[in-house]
Image (tube, grey):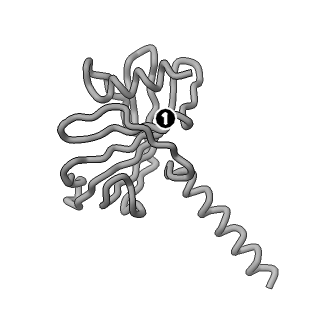
Amino acid sequence: MVFDARRKLAMCALAAGLLAASGTAVAEWTALSATDAVTFYVDPGSIRKSGATSKMWLLLDFKKGQRDAGGNPYRSAKSHEEFDCEQRRTRTLFKSLYTRKLGADGPYYQSAEAGPWSAIEPESGAEALWKFACTSP
C-alpha cells in the first residue's frame, strides 16, 4: 500500500515536471509579431537572462497547416529558445508540435535536444524575438 502511494506521488511529480518543461504551465502568451504565414507569441514571464544570453518560451501559430519531417501535419509549435544577445544568434532548446492552433491540444511530438546556433537575419521574425528577449528587463 505504501509503495502504491509513493508511486502515485512520483507520477504526479513527473507529470508536473513535464507540464512545466513543455512551457504550458501558466504561460501568458502575448502576440509579438506576425507574417502572412505565422503569428509569433512570447511568454514575457519566462525570460531568464544569464550573462550575454537570454532564454524565453515561444508559441508559433501557423495560418496554414505545416508538415514535420515525417509528413505529419501540425498547426502550432511551442519552443524554449536561447538567444545570444552579443553575437545575434539563436537556438532551440526544446520544442513541441501540436495539431491544433495555439497549442490547444496535447503535443504529438516533443524534443529536448538542443539545436545548432543560427544567425539572426535582419528584419525577420527571429530578429523581433531576439530584440524582445535581449532588451526586456
Q: Is 70 displayed left or right of 94 in the figure?
A: left
Taking the spot 27% from the left edge, 34% from the top edge, the residue there is: 34
* Residue 42 to residue 63: above or below: above
The quarter holding residue 30 reads: top left
Of residues 113 and 92, the one drawn nearer to the viewer in this rendering: 92
Q: Is 128 displayed left or right of 28 in the figure?
A: left
| Residue at the extreme top | 86
Q: Which quarter of the figure is the N terminus placed in? A: bottom right
Q: Which quarter of the figure is the C terminus placed in? A: top right
Taking the spot 31% from the left edge, 55% from the top edge, the residue there is: 101
Count of marks, rendered view: 1
* Picture coordinates of residue 80, whole percent (x, y): 46, 41
Of residues 135 and 53, the one drawn nearer to the viewer in this rendering: 135
Is disc 1 placed on a helix, strand or loop?
strand
* Residue 132 to residue 37: above or below: above
Of residues 82 and 130, the one drawn nearer to the viewer in this rendering: 130
Circle 1 residue: 56
* Picture coordinates of residue 6, whole percent (x, y): 76, 73
Taking the spot 51% from the left edge, 26% from the top edge, the residue there is: 54
The amino acid type found where label 1 is placed reads Met
* Picture coordinates of residue 123, whole percent (x, y): 25, 20
Near mark 1 (Cα within 10 A), the count class, few <14, some 14-19 or many ≥20, is many
| Residue at the extreme right | 2
Taking the spot 56% from the left edge, 57% from the top edge, the residue there is: 18
* Picture coordinates of residue 43, whole percent (x, y): 48, 38
The quarter holding residue 59 reads: top left
